[in-house]
Image (cartoon, rainbow, N blue to C red):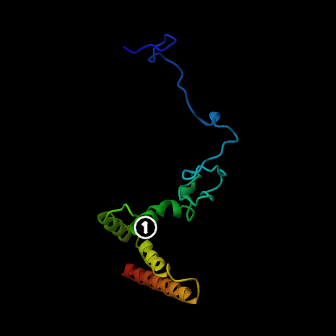
Amino acid sequence: MAEADHDGSSPTEDRPAERIDDEFIPDDALPLCAKCLKPCNPLQYYCDNCASNDAINPLTPYIPFVNIPFNYSVYCTMWRRIWNGNETSIIGRFFYLFLIILCAPIVAVIGVGEILTRKIPQGRLRNAILTILILALIALLVWYACLARR
């Protein structure tokens, strides 16, 4: 049998269900960034304070091109854990690399370019290397498109 609460009524009695909806949200309420907890504009897609890839606006995952950081941030996180994660094991690093190559090979291509140019100071050499890598990437994409037509 159900216990009675402090008023003596049972929780099984018919009572109107309590609903939380827009009536309880104040008009001046602002969404918070999930990473830094900064109040943000409701029409803003991402936090401008901490550059978080967590969407503030609930429609962000459905907007083309705006949803790219939201959808692919997991691959960037895996890439950072491969190269900068001190607590990541060797097996974990190989698993992350396998997933990146399998699911998002473009991240691996761009990441290798970033690693190659990380130590080079800003200047003509760095720009030349980046240009060569971008041209190689375009050639790779054209080659892939030609293979897909066959």
- In the image: residue 59, left or right of residue 139: right
Q: Is residue 60 above or below residue 132?
A: above
Q: Secondary structure at mark 1?
A: helix
Q: Which residue is mark 1?
A: 84
User: Local crowd at mark 1 within 10 Å, few (<14), some, or many (≥20)?
Assistant: few
Residue at the outermost right position: 28
Q: Report the quarter where the N terminus lies.
A: top left
Could you tell me which residue is drawn at 62 percent across and 37 percent down?
Answer: 22
Where residue 136 appears, x then y in whole percent?
Answer: 46, 85
- In the image: residue 45, left or right of residue 85: right
Where residue 70 appears, x then y in whole percent?
Answer: 51, 59
Residue at the outermost left position: 91
Could you tell me which residue is drawn at 48 percent across and 77 percent down?
Answer: 114
Q: Is residue 1 above or below residue 89?
A: above
Residue at the outermost front position: 86
- In the image: residue 7, left or right of residue 89: right
Could you tell me which residue is drawn at 36 percent across and 71 percent down?
Answer: 101
- In the image: residue 91, left or right of residue 115: left
Where residue 134 appears, x then y in whole percent?
Answer: 50, 83
Where residue 32 appears, x then y in whole percent?
Answer: 60, 48
Front residue of 62/24: it is: 24
Q: Report the quarter where the C terminus lies.
A: bottom left
Figure disc tally? 1
Could you tell me which residue is drawn at 49 percent across and 88 percent down?
Answer: 132
Front residue of 121/17: it is: 121
Q: Amino acid at mark 1?
A: Asn
Q: Is residue 142 above or below residue 61?
A: below
